[in-house]
Image (cartoon, grey):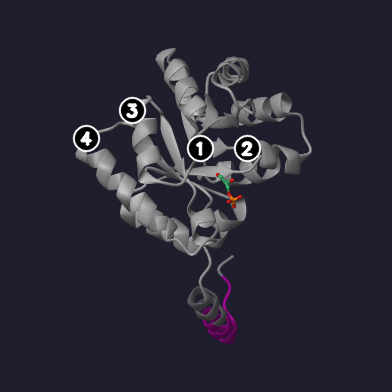
């Protein structure tokens, strides 16, 4: 499973990238707002740092506007994936932009039928939002499983980009189901390294080592 980082915080991306953990980056208008940065400036900085796709989201609500904004965002760098919402106009924009050979990430997906339409419209990525379904007591992971089954039934090349990931359990479940990509906040990716038994075991090793009075260096 590829790891995308869901943030517009450049330092956090750089830290994970240095460890080889970053296959791409996703941003959205809320994340740009949180960063306090200019969208083009910060997106360019991220694109220069990351080899993989960097999603930048359009904000127009009509297809023509999305297409124009998408073309403008795509000028930032070759690795821009244009993000459009899963509305009828978003699907129209997806078709036009993907026919132009551009990467398109169709976002705000909450049903398998929406994901099927995005694949038909040529989406490079479909972004089902797990956490926001869980918030409504609907199993977000079930949606990932449904989309996986449908895409596999018909060999769609659209990649399932599990989004709105809130926990390390989401990461594990997405990987088990076979999501192509998971996009997660940096804190969730870093939390995957943690385990109480690792801490406990390390503590015991350190105490025993101190008793030996030895040094390695
Ligand atoms: O990738 C979409 C993501 O940013 C949404 O996450 O936690 O706001 O539902 P969240």
Residue for badge 1: 107
Some atom of ligand 1 lies within 8 Å of the CB belonging to the residue at label 1: yes
Residue for badge 4: 154
Q: What is the tally of numbered marks visible in this picture?
A: 4
Indicate left or right for 150 with 192 as reference: left
Callout 1 touching callout 2 (CB < 8 Å): yes
Q: Is residue 115 visible?
A: yes
x%, y% of residue 14? 63, 41
Indicate left or right for 16 with 156 as reference: right
The residue tagged with tag 1: helix, strand or loop? strand
Residue for badge 2: 28
Magenta residues, as a range?
204-215
The residue tagged with tag 3: helix, strand or loop? helix
x%, y% of residue 71? 57, 15
Tell me, for residue 120, which label it has, or none: 3
Viewer-closest of 144 and 1? 144
Q: CA distance from mark 3 to mark 4?
A: 11 Å
Q: Badge 3: few (under 14), some or many (20 or more) residues near its Cα, within 10 Å?
A: some
Of circles 1 and 2, the one toward us is 1
Main secondary structure of the magenta stretch: helix
Mark toward the start of the polypeptide (3 vs 4) = 3
- Judged from this view, the residue extending furthest toward the top is 100
Q: CA distance from mark 1 to mark 2?
A: 9 Å
Mark toward the start of the polypeptide (2 vs 4) = 2
Q: What residue is shown at x 63% (from left), y 46% (from top)?
A: 15
């Amino acid at each position: 499973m590829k790891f995308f980082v869901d943030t517009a915080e450049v330092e956090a991306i750089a830290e994970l990238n240095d460890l080889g953990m970053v296959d791409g980056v996703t941003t959205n208008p809320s994340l740009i707002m949180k960063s306090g940065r200019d969208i083009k400036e910060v997106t360019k900085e991220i694109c220069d740092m990351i080899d993989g796709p960097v999603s930048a989201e359009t904000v127009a609500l009509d297809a023509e506007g999305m297409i124009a904004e998408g073309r403008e965002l795509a000028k930032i760098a070759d690795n821009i994936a244009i993000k459009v919402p899963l509305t009828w106009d978003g699907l129209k924009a997806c078709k036009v932009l993907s026919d132009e050979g551009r990467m398109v990430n169709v976002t705000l997906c909450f049903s398998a039928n929406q994901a099927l339409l995005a694949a038909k419209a040529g989406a490079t990525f479909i972004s089902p939002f797990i956490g926001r379904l869980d918030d409504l007591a609907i199993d977000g992971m079930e949606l990932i499983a449904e989309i996986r089954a449908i895409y596999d039934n018909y060999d769609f090349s659209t990649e399932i980009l599990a989004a709105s990931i809130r926990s390390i359990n989401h990461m594990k479940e997405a990987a088990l189901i076979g999501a192509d990509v998971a996009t997660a906040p940096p804190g969730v990716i870093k939390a995957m390294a943690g385990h109480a038994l690792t801490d406990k075991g390390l503590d015991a090793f350190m105490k025993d080592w101190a008793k030996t009075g030895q040094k390695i260096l």
